[in-house]
Amino acid sequence: MASERITLTVPGPDGDREVGLSSPNRVIWPELGITKHELAEYLIAVQGPFLAANGDRPVSLERFPEGVDGERFYSKNPPKGAPAFVEARTVTYNSGRRHPQLVLTEIAAAVWAVQMNTVVFHPWASLTANTDNPVELRIDLDPQPGTDFADAAAVAPALRDVLAEAGLTAFLKTSGNRGIHVFCPIEPEWEFLDVRHAVIAAGRELERRMPDKVTMSWWKEERGERIFIDFNQANRDRTMAGAYSPRALPTATVSTPLTWDELAAGVDPAAFTVRTVPGRLADAGDPWATLLEKPGRIDTLLEWWQRDLDAGLGELNFPPDFPKMPGEPPRVQPSRINPENWPKDDE
């Protein structure tokens, strides 16, 4: 017997589109009973802020054919048979390989992605006009075991101060889990490696000011109960869950932009879900509505990066799937390094 199928009328820049949704009553979040249809309606409800944050840029889709409790996989390029309104842009990955990557230009494309069992949307930090140069500096405040959202929230204002000293305006959102994402709009004049170095410079400055609360250590064995500044999220083809993207967690939380006043007043990231965020937007608006209006520059952070290089602080580790980079430390856990094979630079 054919599976149930409905057709949704989805508004867009060229008028309404009819988008089919098969198995609309399939439950995506079992604990809450949230269905595929409800997820599609959520995206239609938040389409303006969602597209402002995730549209017109390469995006990877995190897909769950059996709901969030089942297996997952990622899609980057449009599959055969994708509708014409699902666009693509050729991008260069860290390996040097080039390939078309999905781009969302209207909410019907996101609803189509839900039809393809997408739950989480992972946008690049660059726009389609220039995919090699980010328009956002992104910093991931990642709680380590023994810490939680409250610890990240205690660190975030100090990071905002560091970024302000470098001439940047910081915006923030929940990760949808325990962490906090801090974004600064920047002029697209620098490629990903430069922006990564700017993130490292900001993170090192914050670590100097809060050594008991913040760490830049790539290796988990060295982090302790501190907030990790995940500098590798600034790399090319590394993405975070987008603003207003659902997360594949049992409570259907959403990665939600906040104001700094809200953070100071105390918020519970678990309160922002597929079912609550549309009402929040209707009542309070989008804290990120002006995010890209006044981009800053990373010149000062790159001066800090050079200052730290001159002081003997070098490059930091890249993810294991990246090619070995100039000046990169050994890709070996510090506890496993054999000094005979990895002599110090001054020996």
Image (cartoon, helix red, strand yellow):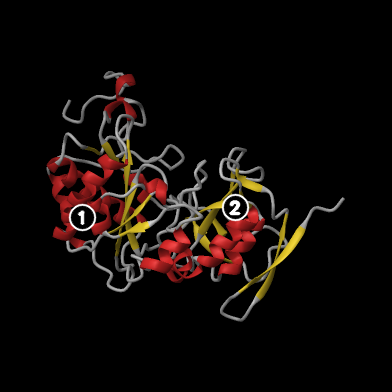
Q: Left or right? Give the position of 346 relative to 120.
A: left
Tell me if label 2 and label 1 are in contact, CB under 8 Å: no
Q: Earlier in the sequence, mark 2 or mark 1?
A: 2
Quick one: 82 or 33, which is closer to the camera? 33
Q: Is residue 77 visible?
A: no
Q: Which residue is mark 1?
A: 160
Residue 56 percent across, percent down from the top left: 48, 68
Quick one: 169 or 345, which is closer to the camera? 169
**Local SS, label 2:** strand
Q: Amino acid at mark 1?
A: Arg
What residue is at 24 percent from the left and 52 percent from the top? Answer: 265
Q: Which mark is residue 118?
A: 2
Residue 164 percent across, percent down from the top left: 17, 60
What residue is at 32 percent from the left and 31 percent from the top? Answer: 219
Q: Is residue 283 visible?
A: yes
Please tell me how many numbered marks the rendered image carries.
2
Give the class, few, some or many, for how many residues have Cα within 10 Å of label 1's Cα (few <14, many ≥20): many
What residue is at 31 percent from the left and 62 percent from the top? Answer: 190
Q: Is residue 12 above or below residue 60?
A: below
Q: CA distance from mark 2 to mark 1?
A: 33 Å
Residue 287 percent across, percent down from the top left: 33, 65
Q: Is residue 82 above or below residue 219?
A: below
Residue 315 percent across, percent down from the top left: 26, 42
